[in-house]
Image (tube, helix red, strand yellow):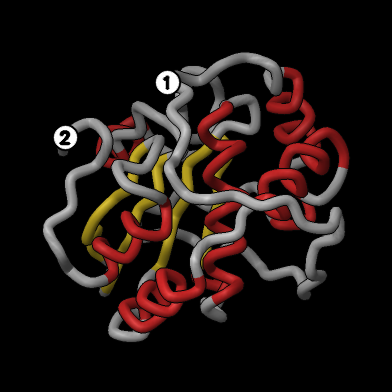
Amino acid sequence: MKKIVLSLSLFAFLACGSQKMATETEAQTTSETVEKPETKPQKSPLMAEGNITLTDFKSGSNKAWFERGYNAYSPDQELVNAFGKAMKNHDYQIDVYMGTWCGDSRREVPRLYKLLEMIDFDMDKLSVVAVNRAKQVPNVSPEIANQLNIHHVPTIIFYENGKETERFVESATESLVKDLTKIASDQTYTDSYGK
């Protein structure tokens, strides 16, 4: 795993696609993050095992960008409450496919962690997979990679009862919390690519 993290860190300064900024208000906070016990990544329904953990984000070359994004993110509490309420109606497994080298991933993944922590999501049901610049998922067959259909990162896939229900792709159409609330509320959701 260290080799994977190190290899991905070498690509940390390269772009991953569009650099759209979400419309959510951000505020600077302290540089400290809330320490939580490490969770063990789960296997997704498509067997893409998480290969990067919160500890990986809080150390080494990932620490600065992760903490900066995490600490700067300050979503409206009413929106967070609506997201939390919608999530209580589901038993989601959430898989995140991201690149540590990708600006969009560096923006959205710290925000996702903060949102999930704010609603007390069971982090054992979160799996984060670091892909390479070709968006190849490690340790899966070509058939599974084809089913995953990862073309842009981050891709956040929501599974329930072993089936994909929806996915967030690369950047928000409104804001991360609003987009995820639409997904969790079973509303019609169209990602930034019109799918």
Instruction: Give the residue furthest to the left.
Output: 188
Instruction: Give the residue furthest to the top.
Output: 14
Residue 14, how many percent across, how many down? 63, 14
Q: Residue at x 47, y 33 (%)?
A: 21
Q: Is residue 112 above or below residue 62?
A: below
Residue 48, how many percent across, how many down? 46, 49
Q: Residue at x 74, y 38 (%)?
A: 65
From the viewer's perspective, is 58 left or right of 27?
A: right
Separation of marks 1 and 2 at Cα, in angstroms: 15 Å
Q: Which residue is mark 2?
A: 194
Q: Name the residue nearer the viewer: 51 or 97.
A: 97
Q: Quadrant of the C terminus?
A: top left
Displayed quadrant of residue 45: bottom left
Q: Quadrant of the N terminus?
A: top right
Q: Secondary structure at mark 1?
A: loop
Q: Secondary structure at mark 2?
A: loop
From the viewer's perspective, is 170 left or right of 4?
A: left
Crowd band around label 1 with a 10 angstrom C-alpha radius: few (<14), some (14–19), many (20+): few
Q: Amino acid at mark 2?
A: Gly
- Count of marks overlaid on the render: 2
Q: Which residue is mark 1?
A: 18
